Amino acid sequence: MVQFAAGGGAWGIFFRCFLSRQIMASDSFQQHLQALRQQVEVSLQSSLQGRGWPQPLAQAVEYSLMAGGKRLRPVLVLLASDLCAGSQSLAISPACAIEMIHTYSLIHDDLPAMDNDDYRRGRLTSHKVFGEALAILAGDALLTLAFEVLGETAAAAEIRAELTVVLARAAGGAGMVGGQVLDLAAERGSFPGTAAASGVVSSLPDEFWRGGAEPEFGRNLPGSAKNPLNAIPATGVSGVEHLNRIHRMKTGALIAAALELGAVVAGATTQQRSQLRNYGLCIGLAFQIADDLLDVTGDAARLGKTPGRDADLGKLTYPALLGMETSRRQAEMLVQEACDSVSDFGPRSGWLQELARFIVERDH
């Protein structure tokens, strides 16, 4: 399990996050998390039925999609929808859709042309079992199935359209895919500039790239002046700024989209969407820092994949730039920022605050 440095620690985060709020026992949180995961598992399996795909493709897709995992993103959709008084029956389709996007990205990320990994979620990666060609096609099928499932959501047409825009923007060139491009460039020692500087046209606001606070809700996005990731020695600024940009796109965009999907399907206000999006960006960076730390300290049996791959690939990581202890402290402070982002929801935000803490305490 990831341990925190002095100066607050895991219990400090716990009491700060839950001061004057309803405190739930850890076992209650784990039970709730497991119940949501089970709901996602059943719905994912059901979503694969009757698609009329060739059998080899159906087998390859099911192999990866039903391999388990944390199911963080679909759980976030369900939690956000519940927080905004939405219907779980309407939220389950976007929850499945975002997990399909995530799984497709893992299949492609593991390919020899990318990270060339042999194991994922405790089993051989897709291309090791089915070959590279079918693995690529399985990823393609999951990507397109995600939007088919969104279109089948039993919500009003304008809600379905908004869900599609939110997910496509987060998964595409201005989000996850673009982050993958920057990540690959960083492996080769390249530190490209912002989207505008490199000629890339982005549909995301400038604040997303700079990390500044969005004026309509006034909270501090990761990268803002008050965020700990900017309070670093001048010698490391360029590397950390670039790393923040990578993971706001590669990891944070999709996690933030999960919160926003839940809010959209629940008919949330603009203010609520903004608060939940900020929560998602904060825990997205905290999640990535925890992943980077686990790649150094984690156990293969618990991780379900081979640790030490980041170093082998020469990846730009938070421990490599900031050191282990500083990285842990940044994760703590990002969790606090996430908790603050949803504090206006009152006691109802308890599950999200528990989840934020779980993200940096996990051992897999």
Image (tube, helix red, strand yellow):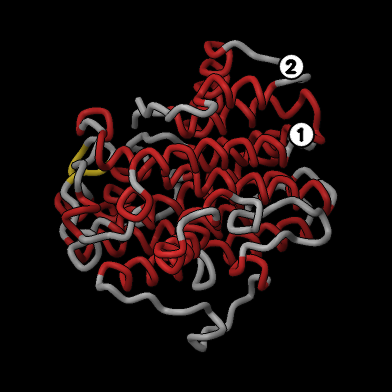
Sequence order check: which comes first, mark 1 or mark 2? Answer: 2
- Residue shown at the point (54%, 14%) measured from the top left: 26
Q: Which percent across, then down, holds residue 82?
A: 72, 32
Residue 112 pos. (x, y %): 17, 63
What crowding class fits label 1: few (fewer than 14 Cα within 10 Å), some (14-19), or many (20 or more)?
Answer: some
- Mark 2: which amino acid? Gln
Which residue is found at the position 35% from the left and 66% from the top? 183
Residue underneath mark 2: 22
Residue beneath the point at 39% across and 70% down: 182
SS category of the residue bearing label 2: loop
Residue closer to the observer: 235 or 114:
235
Q: Is residue 46 visible?
A: no
The 10 Å Cα crowd at callout 2, few under 14, some 14 to 19, many 20 or more, is few
Q: Which numbered circle lies on residue 280?
A: none
Task: Quadrant for the N terminus, please.
Answer: top left
Instruction: Return the x and y of residue 237 as percentages of the image width and height.
Output: 46, 64
- Would you place residue 335 above or below residue 285 in this image? above
Residue wearing tag 1: 343
- Mark 1: which amino acid? Ser
| 288 on left or right of 158 | left
